[in-house]
Amino acid sequence: MALSKRELFQKRRLRVRNKLRKVNVGKARLSVHRSSKNISVQLIDDVEGKTLASASSLEKGLGVVGKNNVEAAAKVGAAIAERAKKAGVEEAYFDRGGFLFHGKVKALADAAREGGLKI
């Protein structure tokens, strides 16, 4: 029986996350979520189960409300890098979830790296 698009996405997301979790013990996780209208990212400490910082294209301060393009993703990436520094996190691993590392997701990661976050 063929799997649905959503089931394939879930399998890919769990496969990526479990492989990353084995290799990056003790580091914070930079988790990305992309919808059709917005993009958001969270910096998560899995040991304590807390979100250390977050950024989203829904925030009015970034000036990209309602936009979901490469420029909006780059602004969100720069914002998360700045907030990670304030939270005292310099190094994290990039959890792309089930999304391909291309386009908006790649722009977000590149902007976070330029902002000083080691991914």
Image (cartoon, rainbow, N blue to C red):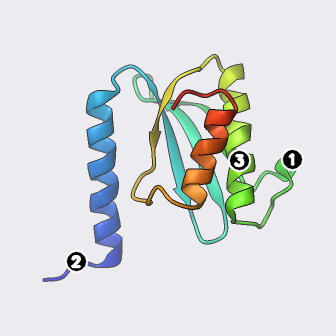
Tell me the crowding category of disc 2: few under 14, some 14 to 19, or many 20 or more residues within 10 angstroms, Cα based. few
Say whether disc 2 or disc 1 marks the residue closer to the N-terminus. Answer: 2
Residue 98 image position (x, y, % from top left): 39, 58
Q: Does 45 sit above or below residue 7?
A: above
Residue 42 quadrant: top right
Q: Nearer the viewer, residue 49 or 32?
A: 32
Residue that carries the numbered disc 1 in the rendered image: 61
Residue that carries the numbered disc 2 in the rendered image: 3
Q: Secondary structure at mark 3?
A: helix
Q: Does 80 sit above or below residue 39?
A: above
Observer able to see residue 54: no
Name the residue at 83% across, 49% down. 62
Identified by mark 3, the residue type is: Val
Identified by mark 2, the residue type is: Leu
Name the residue at 32% across, 61% down. 10
Tell me the crowding category of disc 1: few under 14, some 14 to 19, or many 20 or more residues within 10 angstroms, Cα based. few
Q: Nearer the viewer, residue 43 or 107?
A: 107
Numbered mark located on residue 76 in the image:
3
Identified by mark 1, the residue type is: Gly
